[in-house]
Amino acid sequence: MRIDLHCHSTASDGTDTPAELVRNAAAAGLDVVALTDHDTTRGYGAAIAALPVGLTLVTGAELSCRIGGVSMHMLAYLFDPEEPALLAERELVRDDRVPRARGMVAKLQELGVPVTWEQVARIAGDGSVGRPHVATALVELGVVASVDDAFTDGWLADGGRAYVEKHETDPFEAIRLVKGAGGVTVFAHPGASKRGHTVPESAIAEMAAAGLDGIEVDHMDHDEDTRVRLRGLAKELGLLTTGSSDYHGSRKTVALGEYTTDPEVYGEITRRATGAFPVPGAGGI
């Protein structure tokens, strides 16, 4: 089985619609794909309706969190999307995305960049607006060569010249909320140092004690040394290890299925979940 547990659609900051994402996942030879848009579940319906035979969809989300002044992302799988407490927290995070993006636009304008809110809003479309949309605007304007080049101290990285904070959930609260909604939690790309400061291993140990299920190890932002270190940490803490593409369509160079999750780990994730179940493809539309 080929299993990719971290993908984004136009419901947040990907460039494939949810329907295109599942069709492209099937074309890439995947057996299982997870839809994990940022702080939203809006893509579920369209993805399920288009799900081809032979492909299973894992519903999820990537939750925006912060600990000790460091931003981090928590992948949440197979939770009940209507559970009130988790739904309220996701809405709180999403509601802060627009003023935050407007703030980044204002800072960029102060730096002499001719970006406009209308440009960023056009790029975001119906998705949950975020830094990748602002980064794409910088690419369109020729300010940087790629979206990744915008995530530097000079521009949009944490603490960068145009960075603006937003509401982010405490990860211990995120673990509690996801568990309360019957879901499973995996710390996304914990060693992605090129994105900015990373969470110390001592804090990951505390999260494990609080119920964190796993950490994402095989990821495009982790070099081999980082993967070896994270596997050792996961073994020490009794955490599951996942692998995934973090696919964003044309917004990133990584391909669907470029990194995958072991079927036994996937089976354990589905065993632990009680809020929702993987959806088998029924032919699509």
Image (tube, rainbow, N blue to C red):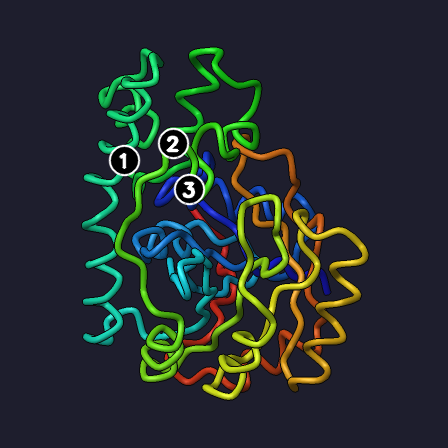
- The residue carrying mark 3 is 159
Identify the secondary structure beneath mark 3. loop
Of discs 1 and 3, which sits in the foreground?
3
Q: Dot 3: few (<14), some (14–19), or many (≥20) neighbours within 10 Å? A: some
The residue positioned 19% from the left and 39% from the top of the image is 99
- The residue carrying mark 1 is 101
The residue positioned 41% from the left and 57% from the top of the image is 48
Identify the secondary structure beneath mark 2. helix
Of discs 3 and 2, which sits in the foreground?
3
- Residue 73's spot in the image, x, y percent? 46, 59
Query: What is the C-alpha distance between the residues marked 3 and 2?
Result: 18 Å
Q: Quadrant of residue 23?
A: top right
Q: What's the amino acid at mark 2? A: His
Residues 38 and 113: in front is: 113
Q: Quadrant of the N terminus?
A: bottom right
Q: Are marks 2 and 1 in contact (CB under 8 Å)?
A: yes
